[in-house]
Image (spheres, grey):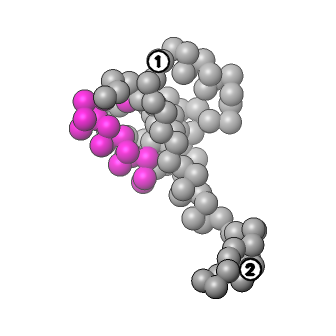
Amino acid sequence: MISRALVTGGAGFIGSHVVDSLLADGVTVTVVDDLSSGDAARVAPEADLETLSIVDKDELDALVDLIKPEAIFHPIPFAVSAAAPRRTPRRGPRGRQRDHA
């Protein structure tokens, strides 16, 4: 079992549930969120909230070096990809290509 974890997007709907689950398992959690779409109120008080963007590589690297997480959870692509339009062809049930706009 892990003892330290970092969760990106942990102030969002999905990420905050990941945080809650890890905390329930006794894991020390650090949340990284720029709060552009998340809400700091969703972050459990037992977790540490670091307000920074994951695209700021230098700051993120420094944080990872500091806290030394044993696991990094990155749930935000799932939420983003569900809302983003698909630009790649998909296969239908019979293997035929379909385009999704």
Who is closer to the viewer here, 70 or 9? 70
Q: Amino acid at mark 2?
A: Gln
Mark 2 vs mark 1: which is more N-terminal? 1
Relative to 54, does residue 38 appear above or below in the rendering? below
Residue at (61%, 60%) from the top-left corner?
81
Residue at far front of view: 94
The answer to whether the residue labelled 2 contacts the one labelled 1, judged by CB atoms less than 8 Å apart, is no
- x, y (%) of residue 66? 51, 14
Helix, strand or loop under label 1 = helix
* Residue with the mark numbered 1: 67
Q: Is residue 21 magenta?
A: yes
Q: Nearer the viewer, mark 2 or mark 1?
A: 2
Q: Is residue 86 above or below residue 23?
A: below
Question: Which portion, as a residue range, is magenta?
Answer: 13-29
Which residue, as the protein is rendered here, is positioned at the far top? Answer: 66
Which of the 4 image quarters holds residue 26? top left
> Residue at coordinates 62% horizontally, 35% vertically from top-left?
54
Q: CA distance from mark 2 to mark 1?
A: 46 Å
Residue 30 visible? no
Residue 23 visible (yes or no): yes
Crowdedness of circle 1 by 10 Å Cα count: few (<14), some, many (20+)?
Answer: few
Image position of 26 (left or right of 83) = left
